[in-house]
Amino acid sequence: MIISTSFKADLKTIVRDPILVMFFILPAFYPVLFKSLVSFLTPIVYEHFSLDLTDYYGYILSLSILMTPLMLGPVAGFLMIDERDSRIQELIKITPIGFKGYITNRLMLPFGASIFYSIAAYFIMNIYQVSLLPLLISSFLAGLQAVFIGYLLYNLAADKVQGLTYAKGFGIFSIIAVADIFDIRWFSTVAALTPFYWIPRLIVDFNLFTVIASLIVNIAYLLILFIATKRQ
């Protein structure tokens, strides 16, 4: 009941802010954009460079999924920054829900929406076949990464303007995610230490090790972030 009420309140806040609306709906357009570009560029790239983009469709699908937490995470971050600036959080701390309950409710929006958008992205693009289990795990990781990005943004940014700058900078994570494409061992090794690397790995190379490693890395980052900011 509380989560449902929180969702409704968050959505009402989002629709009143053009920036939040943009970040919230962009994940619905990225799969369409990616699919259109792929359909247009695949024959052209093959004709001029003898490069078959179909070999990279798994990574392209992964990037489309990754765009979801990169967009929805900042939405939660911006909401919490606004409420911090307006001192609403001071009032919430003395309510029965408490600050931890407030943070949990706030981060449920990007978590749930990221899972939904990620699954939708797969069916909208329809360029690479993935079985149900890796798709569900990848979508779950997208939800965790949205939570991570949202809470990280909230703790890093002093205000919404600074938060928007950080949100744009998070785009670098998409390069890290597809590190394997560059075939540079040290780069892939470093990338594997970040949570964003593991969605493409699950999509293109699904196995037990990948599942375990992806869950460990993503959950570890969340725990480290929550522990590091606990006193705040």
Image (cartoon, rainbow, N blue to C red):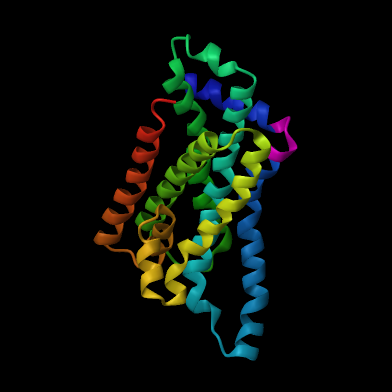
**Residue under the point 45% across and 67% down:** 129
Can residue 168 be seen here? The reply is yes
User: In the image, is 67 to the left or to the right of 12?
Assistant: left
Quarter of the image with the C terminus is top left
**Residue under the point 56% across and 51% down:** 170
Q: Is residue 218 magenta?
A: no
In this view of the protein, which residue sits in the foreground, 194 or 210? 194
Total marks placed: 0
Q: Position of residue 36 (x, y in %)?
A: 67, 67
User: In the image, is 61 to the left or to the right of 193?
Assistant: right
Q: Position of residue 109 (x, y in %)?
A: 52, 34
Q: Position of residue 28 (x, y in %)?
A: 63, 50
Above or below 66: residue 81: above
Can residue 128 be seen here? The reply is no
Q: Position of residue 15 (x, y in %)?
A: 71, 32
- Quadrant position of residue 130: bottom left
In this view of the protein, which residue sits in the foreground, 26 or 159? 159
**Residue under the point 54% across and 83% down:** 52
User: In the image, is 196 to the left or to the right of 75?
Assistant: left
Question: What's the magenta bit mostly, secondary-structure-wise?
Answer: helix
In this view of the protein, which residue sits in the foreground, 168 or 95? 168
* Magenta residue span: 15-20
- Quadrant position of residue 125: bottom right
In this view of the protein, which residue sits in the foreground, 146 or 123? 146
**Residue under the point 47% across and 66% down:** 178
Above or below 60: residue 120: above
